[in-house]
Image (spheres, rainbow, N blue to C red):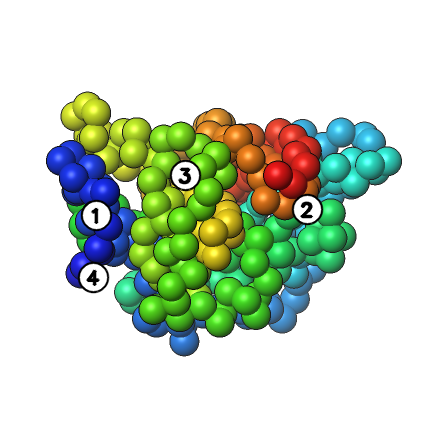
Amino acid sequence: MRKLHINTCFGRLLPVCLTFAVLASCSKTDINKEFNHQPADQSAVAMSSNTTNPSNSTTFYGPVQQIGNGHIRSFGMLENQTNKPLYIGFKITAGGLQNLPTGDHAIYLVPLHPQVKANTIFDHLVADWNPYGHEPGPYLAAHFDFHFYMLSLSQRLAITSNDSLSLKPLATGYLPGDYIGPLGPEPQMGGHCVDITSPELGVFAAPVPFTHTFIYGAYNGKVAFYEPMVTLNYLANSTGTFNIKQPTYFSQAGFYPTKYSILNENGTRSVVLSEFVYHTAN
């Protein structure tokens, strides 16, 4: 366990700070395990496009990657007239949740379609698979960390484990009020900002088992990624749509999601950001 030196962590917040000091989604010590495999026959992959597809929109898919016994890819739905994003996220075929790697950590780079990349605040996606969860506390369950990066791939990969910019504080108002951080840092990711009201942390009430939660990532004093964390059990068996707590200010102009969803479309699982609202830079 890495030690986290944050003077403001005290009382009941101390366990929260220690928990996220080792947010392993998050550890890139096994970065050599990153997967970016193309199946030989992409035509054999049936990805559903039934996610509330209005007639005035187009869905763009990223390249197919192999995962487990199935496949993962990105998708983005844009309005035809305005290119406003309606949905952006991951799709995993049913077989993708079977025969997953059993090592410490597996990383799947999930590129965006160029049209989606050009019309959203996001540059690329990454799915991190943690078969044994990570220490400590509530995050020991097998789970995925679904990263929506605003940094470029080259910027992200250049982040080191002692990069002080990962811990650079965000100015007041650039994180939702219930979030603390950034904590970390984590190589090739940045810092992590945590909602202290997340029920699995048990800060204000008895903790409940972890099923899903939402992390803001940070780098160089700005929000750098969005991260829904979802247990394998929840992803395989449950669905839901949840609010993303919003900051007051935004460092980059663009459309920002206000909800995230875990969906099951005839066996294809999706983790999706939606209900985008445009904000100017502050």
State whether residue 69 appears in this view.
Answer: no
Residue at mark 4 to residue at mark 1: CA–CA distance: 16 Å
Q: Callout 4, which amino acid?
A: Arg
Q: Is residue 151 left or right of residue 13?
A: right
In this rendering, which labeled residue sits more in front, label 4 or label 1? 1
Q: Give the residue at x 25% y 34%.
A: 200
As helix, strand or loop, the secondary structure at mark 1 comes to: loop
Q: Earlier in the sequence, mark 4 or mark 3?
A: 4
Q: Is residue 14 above or below residue 68?
A: above
Q: Give the residue at x 21% y 47%.
A: 7
Q: Is residue 112 left or right of residue 262?
A: right
Residue at the top extreme, as displayed: 205
Residue 55, given in percent of the width and then of the height, sits at 81, 30
Say which residue label 1 marks: 7
State whether residue 194 appears in this view.
Answer: yes
Q: Earlier in the sequence, mark 4 or mark 1?
A: 4
Circles 4 and 2 in contact, beta carbons < 8 Å? no
Q: Earlier in the sequence, mark 4 or mark 2?
A: 4
Say which residue label 4 marks: 2
Which label was assigned to residue 214? Answer: 3
Q: Earlier in the sequence, mark 1 or mark 2?
A: 1
Q: Callout 3, which amino acid?
A: Phe
Q: Callout 1, which amino acid?
A: Asn
As helix, strand or loop, the secondary structure at mark 2 comes to: loop
